[in-house]
Image: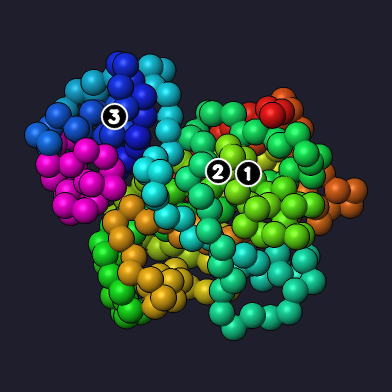
Amino acid sequence: MRLATVKAGGGIRFGAVVDGGFIDLGPKFNGRCNDLAGLLEIGGIDEARRICEGAKPDFPLDALTWLTPNPRLHARMFALGVAYKDHQLETGRADAQFPSLFSKHPQSLVGHMQPMVRPRISDKFDFEGEIVIVIGRAGRHIPLANAMEHVAGYSILVDGSVRDWQKHSVVAGKNFDASSAYGPWITTSDEIPDWRKVMLTTRLNGQQMQHSAWGMLMWDVEFVVNYVSTFTRLEPGDAISTGTPAGVGHRREPQLFMKAGDVLEVEVSGIGTLRNTIVDQ
């Protein structure tokens, strides 16, 4: 099942993307949850699936404006840096025993088909296609053996990176307003039987920039969930973006950065395609 947050019919709605359209789940839960994070908090995925069986879409897809899956202003996204071996090699970093983490702020994220903004203070606006783990069940010190029980599903991130600012502050370089994208939806974990076989492909203006199996990640998804839950209690709706493979623009010869008018697509097998156009601030 694909769960999304959209604008449609004059309001913000959460629901399921199905063949032919979008099913608005809000009214069908009779106020028990008000957004996708709330749906996860009440453990409502199975009920949502039953509701959608045979239901007719409430809106066609072309009537939707896509938001991030969790548009709450206090939503948390943790992000891994240098998490694929091939990206480690292209950056010249030493082997790491543990993940390096930073935060992606909600204000830095836009939805599918929404413009990503290149900040006017930099011409070094880079792309990083990533796969996101979405937490569905709260937990602290989650054991490796139980980690997947806490995963609701998966999504896609464009980690827009302002490389010159990243050199003096990783958090700043990764969090310019509207510089990254998240979505289009959450694909529930039952749709992905083996995360290691999932393939990620990033294309800039139709040209392939990145292509890798998620199985090339240096740490298992189970370990990533376990590790982050060690220092903070993970909550439903929290997201962990798992880093990018090789092929980023600033490591190419010559370097390649995004500019206004560029179209960036990150396609992940079994999940979907996140597509955004670049605009200047």
Residue under pointer 1: 176
Q: Which mark is residue 268?
A: none
Q: Amino acid at mark 1?
A: Phe
Dot 3 falls on a residue whose secondary structure is strand
Q: Earlier in the sequence, mark 1 or mark 2?
A: 2
The residue depicted at 28 percent of the width and 47 percent of the height is: 37
- Local packing at callout 2 (Cα closer than 10 Å; few below 14, some 14-19, many 20+) is some
Q: Position of residue 8 (x, y in %)?
A: 33, 20
Q: Nearer the viewer, mark 1 or mark 3?
A: 1
Question: Does 209 appear in magenta?
Answer: no
* Outermost residue to the right: 254
Q: CA distance from mark 1 to mark 2?
A: 6 Å
Residue under pointer 2: 108
Question: In the rendered image, is residue 237 in sight?
Answer: yes
Residue under pointer 3: 13
Identify the magenta region. Answer: 32-52
Q: Position of residue 281 (x, y in %)?
A: 69, 29
